[in-house]
Amino acid sequence: MEILQKQYAELLAGQQFREEDFDPAVLARHIAALSSSVLLAGCAVSIFDLHRCEHAYESEFHRALFSDPQQEYAGVRIHPEDLVQVARNGVAGMRHVFLRRNPNMDVRRFKLIREYRALVHGVYKRVTEEFQILETDRAGNVWLVLSIVNLSANQQPPYKVASQLIDTRTGDSFSPLDDFFDREEILTPREREVLHRIAQGRPSKEIADELHISIHTVNTHRQRILAKLGVDNSLEAVKYAWILGILDA
């Protein structure tokens, strides 16, 4: 957990904020809209300010849902057995957003949805949380993040942490890769070379000739790429790799 906390801190520190880029009126408008929303009245809603590293807003329902009669309110308390996995998913999602390679990608189009157990009125229950970026600053740093939490309709075991990153523009979704979420670590340089040619529609023999390797080696690289990205075929691999930033647009 200590390593994950360090990685989280390093990701936050990598954003270079300037005080003059922030307009308090922008945050105030979001808070006013959320607090008056009839649709969100029964949801636990909060806004996290990454510039100040604090919650800028928590709805009354949020505080009521996660209050424990026996303890002082301390926000969302995640089940100890789920905590590490939730942290790993969170860091993985942040890497995707903060370390993106495609400068033309609007990070506000991504939504992270995850499911885990949290303390609700003193009892651990499965909840579903949606994260979406509300605002970035002029330099593209992530500023305000919206969180919406609801009780999950499924409260039956097995209890497993689930996480999906969704591109709301294309409808594509995938599970964050906990251990490999920047392009240098996901695929080796040779695997990236092979994948680039796969994306161009090159057959294995042509790839083998261009890279001066055997067809068997190309096919081995193909299988390793599919396994690392957790997909079933080359088309999915290309689509997923583009989302992750492994392939430039």
Image (spheres, rainbow, N blue to C red):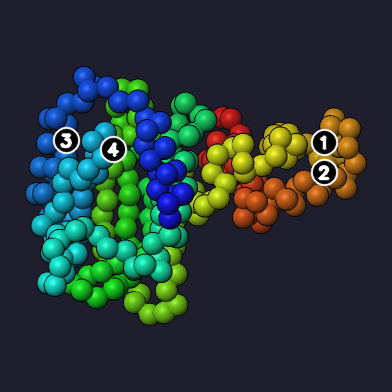
Q: Which residue is mark 4?
A: 50
Residue drawn at x 34%, y 68% is: 79
**Dot 1 or dot 2, earlier in sequence:** 1
**Contact (CB < 8 A) between labels 4 and 1?**
no
Viewport quadrant of the N terminus: bottom left
Q: Which one is closest to the eye, mark 1 or mark 3? A: 3
Instruction: Choose between 142 and 226: the one closer to the eye.
Output: 142
Q: Which residue is mark 2?
A: 218
Residue drawn at x 24%, y 75% is: 123
**Contact (CB < 8 A) between labels 1 and 2?**
yes
Question: Which element is circle 2 on?
Answer: helix
Q: Which one is closest to the eye, mark 2 or mark 4? A: 4
Instruction: Choose between 3 and 99: the one closer to the eye.
Output: 3
Q: Residue furthest bottom?
A: 156
201 to 83, vertically: above or below: above
206 to 66, vertically: above or below: above
Q: Is any part of residue 166 visible from this angle?
A: no
3D distance between C-alphas at marks 2 and 3: 51 Å
Q: Is any part of residue 103 visible from this angle?
A: yes
3D distance between C-alphas at marks 1 and 2: 7 Å
Residue 135 in percent (x, y) is at 27, 34
**Dot 1 or dot 3, earlier in sequence:** 3
Characterize the local packing of mark 1: few (<14), some (14-19) or many (20 or more) Cα atoms within 10 angstroms: many
Q: Which mark is residue 27?
A: 3
Viewport quadrant of the C terminus: top right
Give the quadrant of residue 238: top right
